[in-house]
Image (spheres, rainbow, N blue to C red):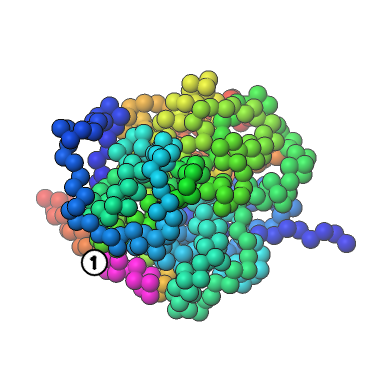
Amino acid sequence: MAKKRPAFYHFLGCVIPHRYPSVEKATKLVFEDLGMDLLDMVGATCCPAPGVFGSFDRVTWASIAARNLTIAEQGGYPITTGCNGCFASLWDSNYELKHDEELRKAVNENLAEIGREFKGSIEVTHYVDALYNTAGLPKIRKRVTHPLKGVRMALHPGCHWMRPKLLKQKDESERPHIFRELCEVSGAEYVPYKDELICCGAGGAVRTADVKVSLEFTKQKFDSLADAGGADIIVTPCPFCLLQLDLGQVEIQKYFGEEYVFDVMHVTELLALAFGHSPEEFGLGTHLQYMQRKSQPNWERLGIKV
Amino acid sequence: MIQASARSRCVTVTTTEEKPAVDVDDDVDLEFVEMIKKTGGPNIQNCYQCGTCSGSCPAGAFTNYLVRGIIRKALLGLKEEVISSPDLWFCTTCYACTDRCPQDVKPTDVIKAIRNVAVAEGYMLGPHQKVAAKVVEAAHAVPLDKESWQNLRVKVGLEPVPPNASGNPWAIDEIRKITKKSGFEKLIGYEEFMKAQKEKAKKKAEEKKSQKKE
């Protein structure tokens, strides 16, 4: 008998479906190639952003997150999401609601208004978990038909998939290796730089409060990368980091007058390219940096003929 | 809007000649620590002021945000000073401090708890009120609010509207019910905010109309 295909409820969040839909499309291609099903979460909302809503009112934050969890609980499949922020809200609330009786009671009182109840019966994963643990590197390696040979690749793992490390138990957050191993399967060459592990600057409601301060973080990362000799692409597992690093280049130019030109991708876009999908197939050129600058990815550096 | 202090404009004030000392006897609120512990920062009293948090903090490099200082002030009961400071909102919640804290204070959670207290006491920044209202109104902090965003989806080969709340008004109704019940709408002043937004839009439309006439 054929082995049952792994299936996940696909939590889209806000930034992927509403601003960077190329990531949604690339993810669908990559998961299909790897024989994993993505199920629609009909009526899912904002996660809601952990550093934003968690900073305003913890109980409301946990209630909206728990409502999203109940959609998956009804179908009984684990959730997967490609956003560090969504992952943090859903994973953290799932954990906190299982361990904090008082919070669970308050949340379920709110959910009773809409006939829902948090049961704590499903797990929350990130695409990185689904790719690394469920599909596994050997299977992914087999699908790579167009390795990105000679492409210099810097990484931005971001914060909320692996931190807080003791709670999440995902990776050693001071010296992480899982995201790097996953990206290296693409055949691109890993370029280390000093500030690889610092935050992109967008989280915790800082981008909303003061975009210039948030861009200071981004600029520090870019300068650190330039000191390391630069890179052809920056890869991240989070669309909010992607937005900050991609659109952020246009904003840095506007506010600080300094020009940086990096192609930035989500990890599923990197894998889609390595699996032989053309950039048009998922719309790599629709990243907001290119739309605003009326530019294109540096196809030559990426080794892609268009 | 918070005043950004770029590195070049950073002023170091340390001695009592340069700045007034904080008078700890003034306005001490001993309930503050208990509030923080209850709101999501239960380990705040573990702190022995080693400063690992601030040494690890990327926000501290660009702004006057000082995690250690905020925690110390909170422990002293300087509630008003802590919750009214805009510096409180420069933490990106990257958790670098939490991963390095030798006392398991979980400084990021403490900061988030203090922010909850600040919002409850009326200290909410304008842009934050706006994004909070977005979720109540559209169930998404970053909504599908323009046709161009739908076109972008079509361009990459997806359906124009995703299966989330953007195409399912019943989901937005559910969020409204939750945020009403939890008191969140009242907390952020949702009704007043939306009313003001509508009036602003109406005024703008009228101005445009009169400009056209001229």
Q: Position of residue B203 (x, y in %)?
A: 18, 59
Would you say residue B72 is visible in this rendering?
Answer: yes
Q: Position of residue B44 (x, y in %)?
A: 40, 53
**Residue at image point 52% right, 76% down:** A116
**Residue at image point 51% right, 36% down:** A197
Looking at numbered disc 1 in the image, what kind of residue is underneath it? Glu
Question: Could you say which is closer to the camera, residue A142 or residue A17?
Answer: A142
Mark 1 burial class by Cα count in 10 Å: few <14, some 14-19, many 20+: few
Within the image, what quadrant is residue B65 found in? Answer: top left
Q: Is residue B85 left or right of residue B134?
A: left
Q: Is residue A48 left or right of residue A208?
A: right
Residue under numbered circle 1 = B192
**Residue at image point 26% right, 62% down:** B121
**In this picture, is B63 found above or below A43?**
above
**Residue at image point 46% right, 64% down:** A62
Question: Could you say which is closer to the camera, residue A223 or residue B61?
Answer: B61
Prevailing secondary structure class for the magenta stretch in the rendered image: helix
What are the residue bounds of the magenta stretch? Answer: B179-191
Q: Given the image, what chain letter belongs to the residue carrying mark 1?
A: B
